[in-house]
Image: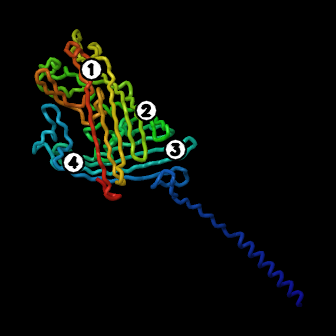
Amino acid sequence: MRVLSGRLLLGSAASLAMMSVASAADLPMAAKAPAVQYVKICTLYGAGFYYIPGTDTCLKIGGYIRTQVESNSAGGGIAVGSNNSSQGRQTRTDTNDIQYRNRAVVTFDARTQGEYGTLRSYYVVGWEATTPTGTAAGTTANAYWDRAFIQFAGFTVGKAQSFFDIYTFGGSRSYLNVRTSGDTGASGLMLWAYTAQFGGGFSATLSLEDPRGHNLAGVIDINSGATLENFFTGAASRDNGLANNLGTGFQVPDIVGNLRYDQRWGFIGVSAALHQVAGGYYTAAAGCAFANTTACGHPEDEWGYALGIGAQLNVPGMPGDTVGAMFRYSKGAVGYSISAGAGGWLLVSGNTVGVAGAYDAIFGNPSNPGGGKLHLTEAWSANAHYEHVWTPTLKT
């Protein structure tokens, strides 16, 4: 009896063990949780960059909100001829003495380290609301983008600041592009450029830039105004007809180059540009039955040019303080010296002619004393700044 009982107990134990194994095999296996990919700090390109999870691309997102109020600013109007536009007449019915501007901007800076260097993509988008010109009700709101470029192996392609600008004033130290400067810092333009680094702080850039970015009022046909036929003889008095643009489409880009020297104390550089100047057809050339057509002919194209020199220096003993300046001279390329808008006016006293406006050149019919050729306009400008840092978050 004892032996039999022992066998039964052993058999029961074996059965229980088999049941336990079978029950465990029937249970579903728990799935493994996916690995968590944390956002990592990227230290390759300075503060503020993070790795995009799952990639080797570093991204920095920034931006700002800026608000501004102006008093007695005339809303940025430009006087045109003898009949000034609203906001240019400075009357109680045509001018707002108080102007408001508000801007919100977001920036994206993405960089990837590759076999041939860093691939960078940079984009700036913003929204702006302003008091409208004139005395109309409401405000104007616009979306815009002033930077969208790719940089790789020395190349810069897209919308960026002109490489003619050595020292920049617009954008960083001014709400808009400064009128008394051709600075493109606040708006940018389209370009294809290559920068060569020679070491020791020396660099050179060759840039092919959109001519429209530097073209303001273009070329003016003086025969378009009713009282301007005798412009070159001084018989004209004063007329708003000079604001008529009779230029052409551009066949070549602006050719821009610069040389820079950057050091810990600041930088200095020189720049130059070539700009195509081309007029449309003559309006009433001798023997021409159809004005402003190929039958009338046109003036020969010219090349305008611009030269610039600029520098920015760190002030010794004043951490963060800087002083900078740039001088520009242009002939037939006024947009490199000033950024005022189109339009202009004419004042004649005897044989002395005063022309105000952002024109690259003027021309008349071949029968005029001007001989039907393009007469290039000269312009120059100079800007300077001193910036003092009071605290890390306050500067003037």
Q: Disc 1 to disc 2, how far (Cα)?
A: 28 Å
Closer to the camera: disc 1 or disc 2?
A: 2
Q: Is residue 5 above or below residue 214?
A: below
Q: Amino acid at mark 4?
A: Thr
Q: Which image quarter: residue 222?
A: top left
The picture places residue 207, in percent across and down from the top left corner, at 42, 33
Q: Earlier in the sequence, mark 1 or mark 3?
A: 3
Say few, some or many: other residues with alpha carbon within 10 Å of mark 1 (under 14 / 14 to 19 / 20 or more). many
Residues tagged 1 and 2 counted as in contact (Cβ below 8 A): no
Residue 380 appearing in the image: yes
Q: Label 4: which residue?
A: 131
The picture places residue 253, in percent across and down from the top left corner, at 38, 28
**Outermost residue to the bottom:** 1
Closer to the camera: disc 2 or disc 4?
A: 2
Q: Label 1: which residue?
A: 374
Q: Earlier in the sequence, mark 2 or mark 3?
A: 3
Closer to the camera: disc 1 or disc 4?
A: 1
Q: Amino acid at mark 1?
A: Leu
Q: Label 2: which residue?
A: 206
Q: Amino acid at mark 2?
A: Leu
Q: Label 3: which residue?
A: 118
In this picture, residue 218 sits left or right of residue 12? left
Q: Earlier in the sequence, mark 3 or mark 4?
A: 3
